[in-house]
């Protein structure tokens, strides 16, 4: 094997510096996993209408939001990490060298309204969103919860266009709107349907569509008070995105772990390297097979601020 002098030391040092923050946070999160008797939010709020207050363990499954909203006055700080494809093998340390990260903050502005902002490392994305839980399951005997999600994203980094191309600020903007329907069938099983619409002010090729439509489904199964198994799937009909290696479907499967009354650690595999809604739906690339999966995790911490 032919190595360049000093290259291994440099790569190893940079890698350790990048990962030390994640290791510190994980050491803080995991000690409480063994507590199987963690108090959780109940399914119903106790009134005569049997309104479902919490359909899923968190306000997002893995990549996609759920109908749930943060309670008024609660704030959630969130770190999302998506490694590269595990098929890169030992040369790419199974995807560790090509990671994508997002740091975000969400606030329960009202009991049924959550807003948030975030920044993603790839393309230096900045985004802001609002989610409105319009109807809760059980209100006036409604069989489902209904919520609408709206996001705006700006790409401030290199988009891969020719260096002499003049790109205006408005061209870097894109918008996502989603209508979500969820139902808690019992204490252990919840599911959700999603209709998505993405508008991009600028696309990479003339064959790309500025408007992209997608549909998705998600489910969560509660195993114990600590462990949940969850999955999400979204499908983008062909002919809308003309990106080399683009996958028309996004699939994520993993576990959601209650590490405290307000903390849900998420560990999962996904074929999407994107994190926010826009990139998950329009920039998921990779071939078929297990080697194209990515190891991913989300680390939240939630607390009361008003």
Image (cartoon, rainbow, N blue to C red):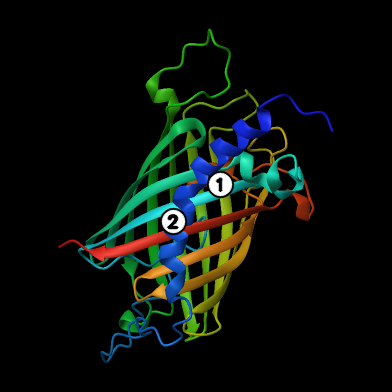
Q: How many marks?
A: 2
In the rendered structure, are the residues bearing label 1 and label 2 in contact, judged by CB atoms less than 8 Å apart?
Answer: no
Front tag of 1 and 2:
2
Tell me, for residue 174, which label it has, or none: none
- Label 1 residue SS: helix
Residue pictured at 60% horizontal, 61% vertical:
268
Residue pictured at 68% horizontal, 38% vertical:
239
Eyeballing the image, is 68 above or below 207? below
Image position, residue 130 (x, y; %): 32, 51
Tell me, for residue 280, which label it has, or none: 1
Give the alpha-carbon distance from disc 1 to disc 2, as whole Å. Answer: 28 Å
Indicate left or right for 29 with 303 as reference: right
Looking at the image, which is closer to me, 34 or 105? Answer: 34
Q: Tell which residue pokes out farthest to the right in this image.
A: 1
Q: Is residue 247 visible?
A: no
Residue pictured at 75% horizontal, 39% vertical:
91
Image position, residue 39 (x, y; %): 35, 84
Residue pictured at 60% horizontal, 66% vertical:
254
Eyeballing the image, is 137 above or below 155? below
Q: Residues within 10 Å of mark 2 (few under 14, many from 20)?
A: few
Q: Closer to the N terminus: mark 1 or mark 2? A: 2
- Label 2 residue SS: helix
Image position, residue 119 (x, y; %): 40, 40
Q: Is residue 287 visible?
A: yes
Looking at the image, which is closer to me, 207 or 126? Answer: 126
Q: Tell which residue pokes out farthest to the left in this image.
A: 306
Tell me, for residue 24, which label it has, or none: 2
Image position, residue 41 (x, y; %): 34, 81
Eyeballing the image, is 63 above or below 30? above
Indicate left or right for 141 with 251 as reference: left
Looking at the image, which is closer to me, 221 or 133? Answer: 221
């Amino acid at each position: 094997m032919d190595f360049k002098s000093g290259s291994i030391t440099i790569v190893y040092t940079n890698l350790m510096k990048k990962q030390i923050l994640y290791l510190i946070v994980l050491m803080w999160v995991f000690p409480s996993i063994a507590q199987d008797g963690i108090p959780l939010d109940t399914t119903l709020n106790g009134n005569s209408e049997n309104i479902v207050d919490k359909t899923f363990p968190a306000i997002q499954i893995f990549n996609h939001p759920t109908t749930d909203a943060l309670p008024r006055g609660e704030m959630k700080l969130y770190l999302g990490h998506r490694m590269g494809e595990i098929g890169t093998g030992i040369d790419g340390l199974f995807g560790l060298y090509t990671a994508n990260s997002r740091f975000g903050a969400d606030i329960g502005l009202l009991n049924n309204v959550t807003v948030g902002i975030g920044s993603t490392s790839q393309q230096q994305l900045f985004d802001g969103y609002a989610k409105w839980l319009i109807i809760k399951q059980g209100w006036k005997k409604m069989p489902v919860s209904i919520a609408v999600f709206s996001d705006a994203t700006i790409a401030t980094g290199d988009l891969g266009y020719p260096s002499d191309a003049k790109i205006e600020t408005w061209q870097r903007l894109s918008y996502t709107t989603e209508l979500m329907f969820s139902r808690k069938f019992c204490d252990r099983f919840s599911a959700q349907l999603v209709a998505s619409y993405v508008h991009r002010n600028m696309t990479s090729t003339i064959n790309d569509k500025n408007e992209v439509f997608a549909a998705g489904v998600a489910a969560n199964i509660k195993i114990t008070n600590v462990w949940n198994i969850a999955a999400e799937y979204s499908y983008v009909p062909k002919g809308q995105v003309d990106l080399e290696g683009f996958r028309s479907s996004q699939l994520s499967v993993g576990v959601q772990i209650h590490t405290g009354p307000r903390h849900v650690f998420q560990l999962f595999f996904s074929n999407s390297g994107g994190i926010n809604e826009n990139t998950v739906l329009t920039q998921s690339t990779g071939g078929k097979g297990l080697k194209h999966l990515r190891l991913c995790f989300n680390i939240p911490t939630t607390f009361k601020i008003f």
